[in-house]
Amino acid sequence: MKQKSDYKKFLLIWSGQLVSAVGSGLTSFGLGVYVFQKTGSAASMALVTLLAFLPVLLLSAPAGVLADRYDRRLLMMAGDGLSALGLVYILICMLSGEAKLYQICLGVFISSVFSSLLEPSYRATVTDLLTKEEYSRASGMVSIAGSARYLFSPLIAGLLLTVSDVKLLLIIDISTFFLTVFCTALVRKTINTQEPERTDSFMESFRAGWNAITEKRGVLIIIIVSSVMTCFMGAMQILAEPMILDFQTSRVLGITETVCACGMLASSIIIGARGLKRNFTGILSLSLAMAGLAMIGFGLRENIVLIGCFGFMFFFMLPFANNCLDYLARTNIDADKQGRAWGLISFLSQIGYVVAYGTAGLMADGIAAVRNTGVGRGAAFVIMLSGVMLAAVAIALYQFRDVRDLER
């Protein structure tokens, strides 16, 4: 039987993740600018992002199994706290002199390995704390926390970089881990946490998670389509910074990213206050199609006002899509399998990011070389092409009846 709502406890743990997201955004922005200034290559920036993302992807499924077998809040504390080690390594390298590309890559990889413990446990904890009626509203709140790294972090980082350097950003990020671990510990202390009694093996638990996401064809379809979509959206996320840095300063980049991310904040507030009630499939298709059109406009010209407007539109659409995907999956998977299921969903739906991070930067550099133009225009071309393909896939998604049936 579903427990009563613990929305206040959800808000506490959400607050910790909000602070953590801001800190992570500072590091991501600072390292991106640092690497681009040192190398002038979009591919180098993409490599750092890829190595920061790949462990989370590869380890998400095993982390999901752990989330159903052990204390979820304890796993969140371990993931948050130990992920600081990689950032400490990068900071030490910078304090000893100039950090080389391979040292930055190693540091973000180590941090990401421990961060992989967080996501499945966090998602499953939301299910533990809330009622079904609160899922949509909570998803909007989670989107707000996720948008913080795009909304607040770039502006703060851009301003701090005018008076200091990336080392200050790393120190701030490392400090945020103490607060997030503290918030999670408080929630854990007030919950009667009981580790599930498991007689099945790790692989049996893994297969149970796989069965949970494949027993309904519609769930599997939205996961596959999500993977295709993350490939196109990943191109936008990885190439926006080199596109703008090619003709503007890091301060202007920070302000522009904040303006763009205001779109995510606006729609997250709307969803968090009202929630979505029906027609999740239609909203999902429409929001992703509009995001694709925004990507096309984003890369049209080296005009910072135009970039800001279309970037705002792109980010405005993302929480609607994420909310619909979250609701359709969450309400069609048994509660006791949520950890395993979300680990697999995270892995499968985000494979597209690996493809984007591994190829988008190389494509941008290659196109720039062939056309004898700046890296920024090569990045813009890849972004616009990805926008066309995203809009096409989003329209095709609505044709699947199995997906529409998930709302019943």
Image: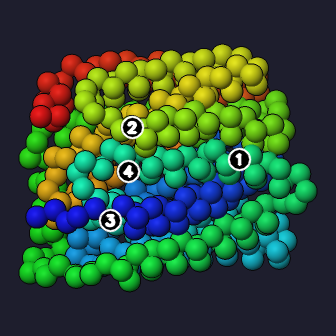
Q: Which residue is under mark 2?
A: 274
Q: Which residue is under mark 4?
A: 138
Quote the CA–CA distance across marks 1 and 2.
28 Å
Q: Vertical placement of 48 versus 271: above or below?
A: below
Under circle 4, the secondary element is helix
Q: Amino acid at mark 1?
A: Pro
Residue sitting at x 51%, y 47%: 144
Q: Vertical placement of 176 versus 228: above or below?
A: below
Q: Which residue is under mark 1?
A: 154
Quote the CA–CA distance across marks 4 and 1.
25 Å
Report the disc number at residue 6. 3
Under circle 2, the secondary element is helix
For mark 4, does the 10 Å Cα neighbourhood hold few (<14), some (14 to 19), or many (20 or more) residues?
Answer: many
The answer to which of 142 and 277 lies nearer the viewer is 277
The disc, 4 or 1, on the residue closer to the chain's N-terminal end is 4
Q: Amino acid at mark 2?
A: Arg
The disc, 3 or 4, on the residue closer to the chain's N-terminal end is 3
Q: Amino acid at mark 3?
A: Asp
Q: Is residue 305 left or right of residue 132?
A: right
Quarter of the image holding residue 61?
bottom left
The disc, 3 or 2, on the residue closer to the chain's N-terminal end is 3
The disc, 4 or 2, on the residue closer to the chain's N-terminal end is 4
Between tags 1 and 2, which lies in front? 2
Residue sitting at x 25%, y 21%: 398
The answer to which of 373 and 297 lies nearer the viewer is 297
Q: Do callouts 4 and 1 mark residues in contact (Cβ within 8 Å)?
A: no
Report the disc number at residue 174. none
The disc, 1 or 2, on the residue closer to the chain's N-terminal end is 1
